[in-house]
Amino acid sequence: MNEVNRTLFIPLYGKARVSRQRIILDDPSAEQIWKKEAFPIHGKSASKWLAYNMAMRARVFDDWTDLMLSGNKKALVLHIGCGLDSRCRRVSQCYENWIDCDFPEVITVRKKYYTESDNYHMMALDAADPRQISSLPDSDMAVVVLEGISMYLTNAQLHNFFQALQEKYSGLHILMDVYTEFGAKMSKYKNPVNDVGVTKLYGVDNIQNILEGLRVRVTAEHSLTPPELVNELEPFERQVFKLLFMGRVYSKFYRLFEFSL
């Protein structure tokens, strides 16, 4: 795997670690896969605080996906940049068609742990190439999960990707986390992806620039660290976590947007 693909092991480790603690995220698949893959994690990547943050982010995306499916039973779910994530198993709502997408080499590894079925498929896809969107199945509504992927795409690539989705689907619900430009610049000092060789990340300061000329609109901004999840931590850890990952300072680095068409 190249350095971008290896970043998938960082959230996998975090989710497995937190799941073993029986807080925030119930993810036995992450526990099992992590045990088998045993990818070396060190430095910032091994921080328990980052693990809590990764697990909370995953839980926020899970809950949102469940909410979207509850109101759109027949929606196509697209998890772009899925890595080895088990969201397809964690959500409580039933779905008719779910496609997990990532680079070919990631999908090859993923197929060691996941089996396709009538309603679940895996597909090689590069979000930097919007032409590949045309090969996805048709649907009146697509629920698109973009977790931990936007920072590897330029603003122009994000715009083109959103445009391709808009042209393909008449109805869209999208959830995407983004670094700010300041957050992307500071990432060389604080970001755990540096531990696996990533040297360039991208940020978004004005989300409307991504949507210029499109019909897709921002419909909400969400917290990546909801208080009800933070409160599952022990009191001392809760206070430290709040200092690290909550409040106005954190929002200067990292934000979470919901879009609809």
Image: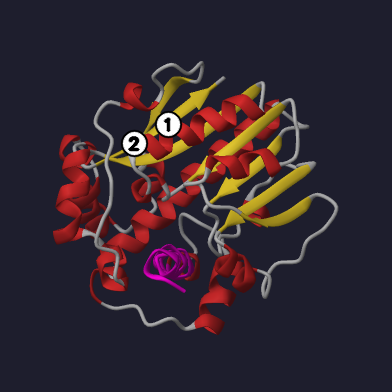
Q: Measured from the top left, where is residue 80 in percent x and y?
A: 55, 48
Could you tell me which residue is drawn at 61 percent across and 45 percent down?
132
- On whether residue 74 falls in the magenta region, the answer is no
User: Few, some or many C-alpha atoms within 10 Å of disc 2 (few <14, some 14-19, many ≥20)?
Assistant: many
Query: Can I make out residue 245 in this image?
Result: yes
Q: How is the image coloured?
A: secondary structure
In the displayed structure image, the side of residue 37 where residue 119 appears, left or right = right
36 is higher (above) or lower (below) than 128 = below
Please tell me which residue lies in front, 92 or 136. Answer: 136
Alpha-carbon span between mark 2 and mark 1: 6 Å
Magenta span of residues: 1-17
Task: Say whether marks 2 and 1 touch (CB < 8 Å).
Answer: yes
Which residue lies under the disc numbered 1? 159
Among the 4 quarters of the image, the one containing residue 204: top left
In the displayed structure image, the side of residue 76 where residue 52 appears, left or right = left
Q: Measured from the top left, where is residue 5 in percent x and y?
A: 45, 66
Q: Measured from the top left, where is residue 249 in percent x and y?
A: 15, 39
Among the 4 quarters of the image, the one containing residue 234: bottom left
The residue under label 1 is which amino acid type? Answer: His
116 is higher (above) or lower (below) than 1 = above
Q: Main secondary structure of the magenta part?
A: helix
Which residue lies under the disc numbered 2? 155
